Image (cartoon, rainbow, N blue to C red):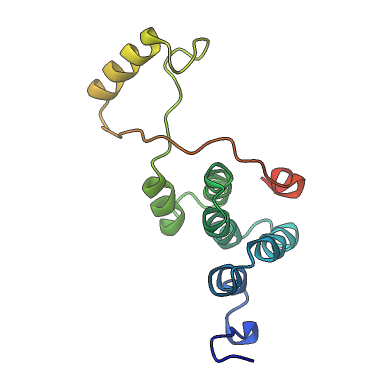
Amino acid sequence: MTSSRLYLWTVPAVLAPVALATVEGDCERAISLCLTAAEKEFYNPEIYLNLGKILLLNGQKSLAIKAFKKGLRLDESHSLLNEHLLSLGVRRKPVLSFLSRRNPVNKFFGVLSRRFSPINSGARKTNGNIPASKLVKKIL
């Protein structure tokens, strides 16, 4: 064994999946561990924080956002979940939901609503439609 090999028994159980994904690059196994933990401890927002981190490492931003939001439903004041969600720049809903996001009328009203909103939160684009396993969709 090499000296860079991570021994998971030295890492706290909550952080083991993140460590596995980060150090060993095994995101699929890490996601599987998080999903198993989420089934057993569905009330623990830390699990959804870790799942979101791993999904980000795996390039699945839209699912990571869903994981962070699910964790926030369990604990609205969780500072790390809030920080991660804000750092991702989640888009707001279109002003006129029956029109496409690219429609000029929707763009115009979107710019107006952002300029005159009390909290000026800029909206960044997400990298959108990334396919994921059925288990992730079931948990989230």
The x and y percentages for residue 114 are 29, 24
Query: At 74% from the left edge and 62% from the top edge, which residue is drawn?
Result: 36
**Residue 126 vertical placement versus 14 (above, below):** above
Image quarter where the C terminus lies is top right
Q: How many marks?
A: 0
Q: Quadrant of the N terminus?
A: bottom right
Q: Residue at x 48, y 49 (%)?
A: 76
Q: Position of residue 46 (x, y in %)?
A: 56, 62
Q: Is residue 22 above or below residue 43?
A: below
* Side of 89 relative to 53 (left or right): left
- Residue 131 image position (x, y, % from top left): 66, 41
Specify the quadrant of the image occupied by residue 40: bottom right
> Residue 59's x, y, as percent?
54, 51
Residue displayed at 74% across by 44% down: 138
Above or below, 23 relative to 87: below
Direction from residue 115 to residue 34 in the image, left or right: right
From the viewer's side, name the closer residue of 73 and 66: 66
Q: Residue furthest front?
A: 2
